[in-house]
Image (cartoon, rainbow, N blue to C red):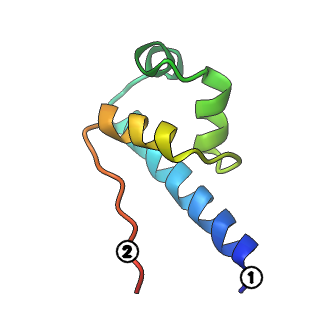
């Protein structure tokens, strides 16, 4: 598996988990954007696995009451 496939898989999985946490907390995209000061289009792209920024993912995880953790096995 190439490094690009691994990176895409991580982006996709992280985005899916961020989306699930936002839906679980019943938060709308616009309200999350206002609280975190991350543009709506960036949050949307992150949740679809098309964009990754560690600092922005960390902001969202903190807002949802979670921590980012990467486990290599």
CA neighbours of label 1 inside 10 A, class few (<14), some (14 to 19), many (20+): few
How much space separates mark 2 and mark 1, taking CA atoms?
A: 19 Å
Residue 53 in sight here? yes
- Quarter that holds the C terminus: bottom left
Q: Is residue 28 left or right of residue 62?
A: right
**Of label 2 and label 1, which has the lower sequence position?**
1
* Residue lying at 65% horizontally and 67% vertically, measured from the top left: 7
Which corner quadrant of the image does residue 45 belong to?
top right
Residue 19 in sight here? no
* Residue lying at 51% horizontally and 47% vertically, measured from the top left: 54
* Residue lying at 71% horizontally and 86% vertically, measured from the top left: 1
Residue 24 picture location, percent across and down = 34, 38
User: Relative to 56, does residue 2 appear above or below in the rendering?
Assistant: below
User: Relative to 70, does residue 24 appear above or below in the rendering?
Assistant: above
Residue 23 picture location, percent across and down = 41, 35
Rendered image: mark on residue 45: none
Label 1 SS = loop
Q: Are marks 2 and 1 in contact (CB under 8 Å)?
A: no
Q: Which residue is mark 1?
A: 2
Q: Which residue is mark 2?
A: 71
Label 2 SS = loop
């Amino acid at each position: 598996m190439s490094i690009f496939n691994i990176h895409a898989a991580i982006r996709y999985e992280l985005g899916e988990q961020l989306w699930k946490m936002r839906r679980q907390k019943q938060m709308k995209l616009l309200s999350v954007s206002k609280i975190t000061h991350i543009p709506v289009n960036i949050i949307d792209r992150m949740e679809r696995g098309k964009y990754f920024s560690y600092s922005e993912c960390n902001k969202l995880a903190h807002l949802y009451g979670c921590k980012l953790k990467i486990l290599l096995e």
